[in-house]
Image (cartoon, grey):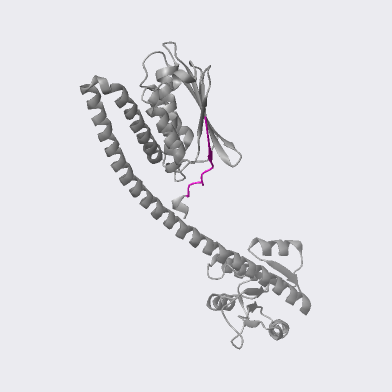
Amino acid sequence: MSERARDGGKPEAVILAIDDTPSILDFIRSVLEPEGFSVCVATNGARGLERARRLRPDIVLLDVMMPDLDGYSVCAALKSDPATAGAPVIFLSAMASGLDIAKAFSVGAADYMTKPVEPVEILARVRVHLAALELARIKDLQTERLAAMVEDRTVALRSALKERDAYLREVNHRVKNNLQLIASIIGHQMLADSSAAAILGKLLGRVESFARAYDQLWTSRRLDGIHMGEYLRTVVATTLAMRDGSPVEASIDVDADPFSLDVALPCGLIVHELVSNSARHAFGDEGGAIRVSIAPDGDAYLLGYEDDGRGCQDALADAPGLGIKFINALSGQLGASITLSGSDGFKAALRFKKPERPKDVSLA
């Protein structure tokens, strides 16, 4: 509705009536003004256009036959002007042929009534078009508000993403530098002291598993944690690359939501230890196969591991026992215990409570 109010109350609708017959204009006033509408009039097309541009009426009631500009020309001019294009135009005319009515709609009319017109019909048509106009305006307002909300949200998301990238870039830089330094020291020590090469080789593999987790978090560009399938494939491939002899086939099957870093790292390190044990003890020159899986198990996840090598005793023959102790310590971090079994091939199972899904910081 137009931003005009009666007695400080609800805004009233402004109706512009354009007709060259004064009695018709008086009739329109007598019908609409008692119902609370503000009625303005014009007795020819040129004056009607001028008043429409100045008043911005809610609805225009328009005659067809007028001496200067006919109603079709006036309607077309109203619809071509952004200032008046939104006002519905209702024709009131004695011309009732289908061609006349079709021409009115072709120039932008919203409705067409033939004279003589009953007061109740004028009121009904005006109210229907005002209701439709109000609904359209509400829709436009809601669309504008939604667009503003989306824009605000987009700005916030971009800011959050920028902060996240800066934070992860710094974390990745520091962690990667530290891990590279440790790996370099271990590598030099292995070259300098062959008696320590085996133990240092295990330590190097553990450092590599740490590094792969941070690399996966950074390079994936995902905000919802470590995707374990991608991470474990990298860990297993890196660990097996250190083995001499025939290749070992690896199968990775993960059905799990992304894990936060504090859950993903222990899982990755456990898998590294198991793969490393199998690579060293379970397989001969002929190679073999391993399978790693993570799957839902009720309210928990089950991390499964198996190989088709020589069996449990050989697989656990880690002279100082550090590998298995390390696995048990990592299992404790997850609040779980690991089961190791198998005399024909080696199997391990780790059941731990489902971690909470990492929060997407960009959507907080």
Can residue 5 be seen here? The reply is yes
Please identify the residue farthest to the left as the structure is shown.
192
Residue 96 point in image, percent of width and height = 76, 67
Could you say which is closer to the camera, residue 301 or residue 317? 317
Where 291 falls versus 39 (above or below)?
above
Residue 358 counted in the magenta span: yes
Q: Which quadrant of the view contains residue 113?
A: bottom right
Residue 314 point in image, percent of width and height = 45, 18
Q: Which quadrant of the view contains residue 29?
A: bottom right
From the viewer's perspective, tell me whether residue 182 is left or right of residue 36. Answer: left
Where 146 falls versus 48 (above or below)?
above
From the viewer's perspective, tell me whether residue 336 is left or right of residue 44. Answer: left
Q: Which quadrant of the view contains residue 277?
A: top left
Could you say which is closer to the camera, residue 265 or residue 211? 265
Where 24 falls versus 301 (above or below)?
below
Residue 235 point in image, percent of width and height = 41, 29
Q: Which residue does the image show at 61% across and 70% down from the upper left?
A: 87
Residue 230 counted in the magenta span: no
Could you say which is closer to the camera, residue 18 or residue 187? 187
Q: Which residue does the image show at 64% across and 67% down from the upper left?
A: 135
Residues in magenta, as a range: 349-359
From the viewer's perspective, tell me whether residue 196 is left or right of residue 296. Answer: left
Can residue 226 be seen here? The reply is no
Could you say which is closer to the camera, residue 63 or residue 288? 288
